[in-house]
Amino acid sequence: MKPKHSLRKLMALLLTISLLPAAASATQVLIYSDHEPLGGMRTRFINDVFFPAIEKESQGRLKVDAHWGGELNNSYEALGKVSQGDVDMATVVPEYTADQLPLHQIFKSFPVGPTGAHQVDFFRRAYADIPAFQRCGNGDESG
């Protein structure tokens, strides 16, 4: 009887292993929400460049189901919808969620400052060197 029992285990193991590639390559659909209608420069770029790049980089394992023009939420609700898991990705306006994203408000206080490449360098240094911004990169927006 023992050999029969081992044969069943072996068959079950082989079946499981044979199903793994199918499970690993299953497509996952990400829900994206945007408060603006499709057609502007930003929304066209997201739809025509960013989303295809996601699909290409994931080798087709990720697809995006995009909802435009506030279909799923308005701009004030976007961060909450992502936080609650109602959508996977959304365009979030930091000014509308200042309590949840306080560190994203600080740079609006500068009346003048660096421009062009100097501005990009400034923001990169700020996020790399200031400990509070480093926490933001790890998902801690509490400051």
Image (cartoon, grey):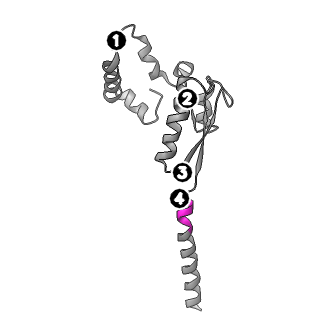
Amino acid tagged 4? Ala
Q: Residue at x 55, y 90 (%)?
A: 3
How much space separates mark 4 and mark 2, taking CA atoms?
31 Å
Which quadrant of the rendered structure holds the C terminus? top left
State the residue position of label 3: 61
Residue 93 in the magenta stretch? The answer is no
Compared with residue 52, is residue 10 higher up or lower down, i.e. above or below? below
Which residue is nearer to you in this view: 60 or 95?
Answer: 60
- Quadrant housing residue 76: top right
Position of residue 15 measured from the top left corner of the image (x, y, whole percent): 57, 73
Q: Tell me the tag on residue 104.
A: none
How much space separates mark 3 and mark 2, taking CA atoms?
22 Å
Instruction: Say which element carries label 1.
Output: loop
Residue 23 in the magenta stretch? The answer is yes
Nearer-N-terminus badge (3/1): 3
Nearer-N-terminus badge (4/2): 4
Relative horizontal placement of residue 106, taking residue 115 as reference (left or right): right
The kind of secondary structure the magenta stretch mainly shows is: helix
Q: Are marks 2 and 1 in contact (CB under 8 Å)?
A: no
State the residue position of label 2: 44
State the residue position of label 1: 113
Amino acid tagged 1? Gly
Nearer-N-terminus badge (4/3): 4
Instruction: Say which element carries label 4.
Output: helix
Position of residue 99 measured from the top left corner of the image (x, y, whole percent): 54, 21
State the residue position of label 4: 24
How much space separates mark 3 and mark 1, taking CA atoms?
42 Å
